[in-house]
Amino acid sequence: MRYAVVQGEIIDEISYHHKGISFNSLARRLHGRVSRVKLLSEVNTLQREGLILVETDPKHKQRKLFRLGQRLRDVVDKIRSIEDKASGNPLGDFSSLLSDYVNDIISAREDWYKEFMRHRLQMYVRRMLVRLEGGTVDG
């Protein structure tokens, strides 16, 4: 499976909902960035690859909840710990952050995970630059 940026956005959004997020909620959160048709297609692809899990909502039997698979959850948690470590002093800790990311990218076995980590690094650098310029981040 080839990595697509839209998959990174979907995974990022799902990762904030440990108990799962419904398709409609996910579509609302990604409105303007991902169409519902593309979202459904990518969610099905990610599910087939075992990166996300689909479960029935115990409170509503017709609703499906999407959660990260354990392997992907571990990767996202590791990425967040790298980013959290550098969040206090983005400029001072940038070389450490970059080093941690590069080491994780090199050690990743699968190209998809490498591309996902590169995407996250690009997003982090973008957020950091916007913050340094005194702006707000919109995504």
Image (spheres, helix red, strand yellow):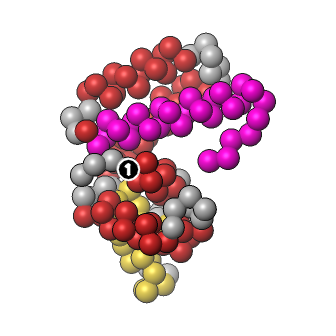
Which residue is pictured at 55% across the width and 33% down the height? 124
Q: Position of residue 31 (x, y in %)?
A: 60, 64
84 w.r.t. 72: above or below: above
Residues packed near mark 1 inside 10 Å, few (<14), some (14 to 19) or many (20 plus): few
Identify residue for label 1.
4
Of residues 31 and 50, the one nearer the viewer is 31
Q: Is residue 129 magenta?
A: yes
Q: Position of residue 99 (x, y in %)?
A: 42, 17
Q: Is residue 18 visible?
A: no
Which residue is pictured at 69% across the width and 32% down the height? 130
Q: Quadrant of residue 110?
A: top left
Disc 1 residue type (three-letter): Ala
State the predominant SS element of the stretch in magenta: helix
45 w.r.t. 63: above or below: above
Which residue is pictured at 37% across the width and 22% down the height? 102
The residue range painted magenta reads 112-139
- Residue extending farthest right: 134
Which residue is pictured at 41% across the width and 70% down the height? 40
Secondary structure type for disc 1:
loop
Q: Is residue 78 magenta?
A: no
Q: Position of residue 82 (x, y in %)?
A: 48, 29
